[in-house]
Amino acid sequence: MRKGILDILKGKFLVSGDAPKNWIFIIYTSFLAAVMIASSHSADYKVHQIAALNEEVKDLRSQFIDGQTDVQRLKLESEILKTVAEDGLLPSETPPHKIRVKSAE
């Protein structure tokens, strides 16, 4: 057992007779490790991107609600009266009259 551990530490398995088989396995595991690391980095990047987009959505939703509130306030009759009063228009003091058209039958 001690000899096996010493052979591994010295790297004899890399230069022995069946070394090409060991090298292929080492290259294969190194490739898989590189793919795993790249995949992990890609997933982390996407998570950060999703978080940033969620923050942007929250900000845009807040802006939309603020704009909608302003529009609803501007549609109020009192706000319209203030706006047209600046242009010199005032509400009529006499109510409108209904016009009736009689048919010529």
Image: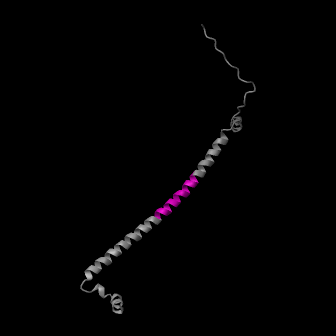
Quadrant holding the N terminus: bottom left
Q: In this rendered view, identify the residue nearer to me: 41 or 17.
A: 17
Q: How many marks?
A: 0
Residue 43 appears left or right of 105? left
Looking at the rendering, which quadrant does residue 85 occupy? top right
Residue in the image at 75% along x and 27% along y: 93
Query: For residue 59, which quarter of the picture?
Result: bottom right
| Side of 89 where 49 appears, left or right | left
The spot of residue 75 in percent (x, y) is 66, 38
Determine the residue located farthest toward the left in the rendered image: 17
Q: Considering depth in this image, is 24 or 86 the residue closer to the camera?
A: 24
| Residue 51 magenta | yes
Task: State the extent of the magenta-drawn residues as a range.
Answer: 45-60
List the single residue furthest toward the right. 93
Q: Quadrant of the C terminus?
A: top right
Name the residue located 57 percent from the left edge and 52 percent from the top edge.
60
**Main SS category, magenta section:** helix
Q: Position of residue 18 (x, y in %)?
A: 25, 83
| x, y percent for residue 53 | 52, 57
63 and 57: which is toward the camera: 57
Image height of 76 relative to 8, above or below: above
At 26% across and 83% down in the image, what residue appears?
19
Residue lying at 70% horizontally and 20% vertically, measured from the top left? 97
